[in-house]
Image (cartoon, rainbow, N blue to C red):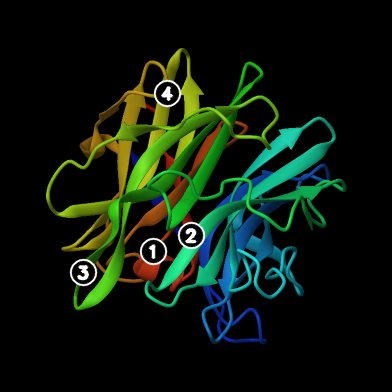
Amino acid sequence: MKWIKKGLIYAPNGENGWRHQFALCPIPFLQKNGTLRIFVNICDKELVGRVGYVDVNPENPSEIYAVSELPVLDVGRAGAFDDHGCVALDLLKVENKLYMYYVGFQQGVNVPYYMFGGLAVSKDGGRTFKRYSQSPVLDRRGNEIYARCGIQVLNDNGKIKMWYVGSFKDGWTTAQGKLKPLYTMMYTESDDGIQWNKEPVQCMDYASADEHGFGRPHVWKDGGKYKMIYSIRTYSRGYYLGYAESDDGVHWTRKDDEVGIGLSETGWDSENVSYGYRFVYGDKTYLFYNGNGCGKTGFGYAELVRE
């Protein structure tokens, strides 16, 4: 693959209380009116995240039509798994509904935070969302006691498949004097997108001792092969994007040097690139992604070069 960068689309500048900073994990969704709605997660001054959107022209995503004035998904009630923020990660059409999978944040005492997967449902085409439950649909299990997050889903011939990021080993490591999470890539399945009862399996390993986690994967099928763009978290340089392929969606071969996108020499994505999401529109294929600070400088896009 080879991607040509098209530039930054949106970054908050502190214009109001909840829409103050960061714009991370973009999720493109084509609306019935032809507008491309990009759901994105925006933080307030206290780094508490809420889900909003940026509406753009699908022919030219750098042309912004509107930015959400209010969150489409706010923080959960006090004491819930998502009472300190929520970050949307993927969407799934289920009959006449739209499922939004998100991660809920809850502050910890002996560890910085906990993150587990929630579900919100829209019955009006993505204009509004309501929580399916006050509890996570991807809750702690086994050794995954700190995090089950980074969710991506795919309806594959009626079987709903999920790739996600879960706690690994002791769950935490130390880098630059701070506790950092240890994550690994996991796979599981569901019949309805709500109950995830199949025993999850680890589906990807670290490539070197410099790695200590993965970020939101994005999986699609090309013919009979599964392909994945995902984020790799390292001690030395933070996040960058990788690429892998699989015949069954479970056993992956890493081909990170084929991802086709890296750092710019200067600007908003010159230090990190992460949280990529591939989207096909007509004869164009876009990659929406974050740059420096995992969304601190906003999100932009690149276009695939046809070979």
- Eye-nearest disc, 2 or 4: 4
Farthest residue, direction front: 142
Amino acid type for the residue under numbered disc 1: Gly
Measured in 3D between alpha carbons, the distance from the residue under mark 1 to the one under mark 4, in whole angstroms, is 27 Å
In the visual, does 258 lie left or right of 13?
Answer: left
Q: Are marks 4 and 3 in contact (CB under 8 Å)?
A: no
Question: Which residue is the site of mark 2?
Answer: 300
Under circle 1, the secondary element is loop
Q: Earlier in the sequence, mark 1 or mark 4?
A: 4
Mark 4 belongs to which amino acid? Gly
Is residue 305 something one can see in this rendering?
no
Q: Residue at x 68, y 62 (%)?
A: 53
Disc assigned to residue 291:
1
Q: Which residue is mark 4?
A: 249
Few, some or many residues within 10 Å of mark 2 (<14, 14–19, 20+): many
Rendering coords of residue 106 (x, y %): 54, 69
Labels 1, 4: front one: 4
Q: CA distance from mark 4 to mark 3?
A: 31 Å
Residue underneath mark 3? 174
Kind of residue at disc 3: Thr
How far is disc 1 from disc 2 in space, using C-alphas?
8 Å
Q: Are marks 2 and 4 in contact (CB under 8 Å)?
A: no
**Dot 4: few (<14), some (14–19), or many (≥20) neighbours within 10 Å?**
some
Q: Is residue 129 above or below residue 191?
A: below
How far apart in space, not on screen, are marks 3 and 1 (Cα)?
23 Å
Q: Return the disc, 3 or 1, that comes first in the chain's sequence.
A: 3
